[in-house]
Image (spheres, coloured by chain):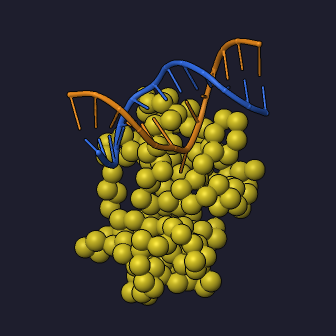
Chain colours: A yellow, B orange, C blue
DNA sequence: AGATTGAGCGGCA
DNA sequence: TGCCGCTCAATCT
């Protein structure tokens, strides 16, 4: 449970037995989302660097997943949803409703479960959007918007 | 075991 | 546009 500093970004990281089990996206220093990750500690610099490269688009999420030892600590339905998310290509999006149909659940539940995605960016849940607007995001709609613009989805 | 809570959606005016 | 009712897994109580 630490915060890793890369350039001018700060990334919350949780590692268990050498496996990444939770992370945040790169955030500004004072971000509320970093609070529960505690102090800055660079011992997991390697994890942080990969997430940073993923964030700026230097690598894609498949490369990142290959380079990182991670463990997905979620229930069955969440796992199914996250697996589906891996099929969304960079620059592409899917709606909560469409994704819900693929795994036989409701749009509301997709959003509810994605809110708990422990590995954002690695599992690019920002590519799931609402039908009428961009939809919500754990780290704020503006971050989601910036990510989608950066990826060329908008 | 029952109530509440959402990162949504479609229909209707 | 804005409101309403439906949705249903996870997380309380």
Residue sitting at x 44%, y 54%: A117
Residue sitting at x 43%, y 45%: A113
Is A106 positioned to the left or the right of C12 in the image? right
From this view, report whether residue A81 is shown above or below residue B13.
below
Quadrant position of the N terminus of chain A in the picture: bottom left
Is A134 positioned to the left or the right of C12 in the image? right
Q: Position of residue A9 (x, y in %)?
A: 59, 79
Tell me, yes or no, if residue A98 can be seen here.
no
Q: Position of residue C2 (x, y in %)?
A: 73, 31
Closest to the observer: A113 or A33?
Answer: A33
Residue sitting at x 34%, y 57%: A72
Closest to the observer: A31 or A120?
Answer: A31
Residue sitting at x 60%, y 68%: A55
Is A93 positioned to the left or the right of A35 in the image? right
Closest to the observer: A39 or A83?
Answer: A39
From this view, report whether residue A90 is shown above or below residue C10.
below
Closest to the observer: A75 or A40?
Answer: A40
Is B2 positioned to the left or the right of A98 in the image? left
Tell me, yes or no, if residue A119 can be seen here.
yes
């Amino acid at each position: 449970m630490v915060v890793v500093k890369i350039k001018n970004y700060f990334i919350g990281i949780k590692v268990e037995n050498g496996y990444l089990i939770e992370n945040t996206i790169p955030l500004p220093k004072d971000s509320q989302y970093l609070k529960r990750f505690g102090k800055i500690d660079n011992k997991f610099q390697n994890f942080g660097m990969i997430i940073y490269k993923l964030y700026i688009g230097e690598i894609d999420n498949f490369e990142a997943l290959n380079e990182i030892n991670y463990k997905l600590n979620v229930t069955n339905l969440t796992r199914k949803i996250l697996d589906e998310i891996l099929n969304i290509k960079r620059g592409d999006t899917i709606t909560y409703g469409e994704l819900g149909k693929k795994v036989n659940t409701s749009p509301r539940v997709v959003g509810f479960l994605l809110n708990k995605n422990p590995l954002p960016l690695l599992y690019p849940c920002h590519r799931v959007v609402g039908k009428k607007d961009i939809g919500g995001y754990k780290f704020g709609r503006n971050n989601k918007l910036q990510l989608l613009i950066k990826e060329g989805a908008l």
